[in-house]
Image (cartoon, helix red, strand yellow):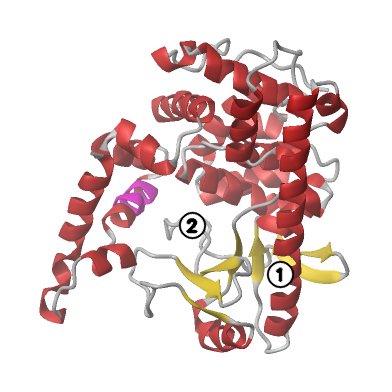
Amino acid sequence: MPTHRSPTANSEIPRTHHQNVPSNDALLRATLWLMGFGQHVAEVDSQALNAFVRHHGVAGLLDRTRVETLDRTHSTALAQEQRRIALRALQLGAALQNLIPAMTARGLQPLALKGPALAVQAHGALSTRGGVDLDILLSEEQWPAALEVFQQQGYTPAPGQRLPLARGTHELVLLHRERRPRVELHRRLLRHRHLIADTQGMAQEVDLQGTQVASLDPIHALPYLIAHANQHCFRRLIWLMDIHALLQRPDLDMQRVARQIQRTGTCAMLNTCLTLLDTLFGTPVAAPLQRVRRPCRASHIMAALALQAIRESLSDDEVAQRLGPLKRVSMDIALQDSLSGRLHALSGWLSPTDKDSNWMTLPPALSFLYPLVRLYRLARRFR
């Protein structure tokens, strides 16, 4: 079992004043211990601990033996949260089991991202990972047929969603008339179009309780999961636990993973991720990954920011507000591995989304002004 090291003990992570908040640190340490890492700590408020575990989505990964050693108030609350996660996981799995065969029957090639498929790949059980929605990747030319399937299954686009999508929007949100799990239909893996643009040959069949579901194989899933977590400042423990678990797979070819990290331009993001994994879980770094990680000032700042966000259970908007627009965008650009990647990232930040076009409708002749609308909305969001 890995030995937990103090999140303030790693010399690579700059110290911030937020790291001295004892209540947040105690909640993090208690949660890590309940997941099997580190030493037992003094008990914390049961309601606060339950809220912390729920925010980070890790109830399904708690060690039941350790949960049962807690007093009745703590153990009962956490057991209820585990049951909630398991129920939600079953709902997501059932929805995916209905959708994937219906799509493949039409000759479509959907790829399930994260969610139930990743729960099986990384943690070995569907019940370990809940969530709020299903993420499905599908090439855009297949969307007309896919939307017919979704409509037959009771799904329609969420209010405010419209086709064609704005250049800066990479997913369509679909809601079910009977409030089944919502679906995010992705036309690309990530917000930035240049990262992991081609998914040809990346799929692996996952047995989801008798239904074969195509998902990213671990070698290609790791760069995606790292880039996705980086997109959200690594602010939730479940994203780091997914990566940690995949890295523990005995069948994982670390040389191929390292080559894929380099190919996708995620070496600086990898450095942030490995720093966090080592700090929180004591995850050993394989030599091939050690060679391709790219330490840089931006990755150190991101690691410190992530620890703060994890401790304080911050949302995306709260992280953004603390950083400010210039620092958030410049840090994201600096974490790209190449000049072309940095230019693409800047272009991505300036690309209008559906929310921008919904916020202000411009006549077609003035549509070239949407990047300015984007800039204005970013400034308002980060204020």
Extreme-front residue of the structure:
73
The residues colored magenta run 340-346
Q: Nearer the viewer, residue 219 or 157?
A: 157
Q: Secondary structure at mark 1?
A: helix
Closer to the N terminus: mark 1 or mark 2? 1
Foreground: disc 1 or disc 2: 1
Which residue corresponds to mark 1? 96
Residue in the image at 72% along x and 49% along y? 84
Check if mark 1's residue and mark 2's residue have beta carbons within 8 Å: no
The quadrant in which residue 300 appears is top left
List the residue tagged with mark 2: 190
Q: How many marks?
A: 2
Percent coordinates x, y for residue 150 in the rendering: 59, 82
The residue lying at 33 percent from left, 68 percent from top is 167
Residue 87 at what x, y percent from top left? 75, 55
Vertically, is 242 above or below 159? above
Q: Is residue 344 magenta?
A: yes
Residue 261 inside the magenta-drawn segment: no
Q: Name the residue nearer the viewer: 16 or 227.
A: 16
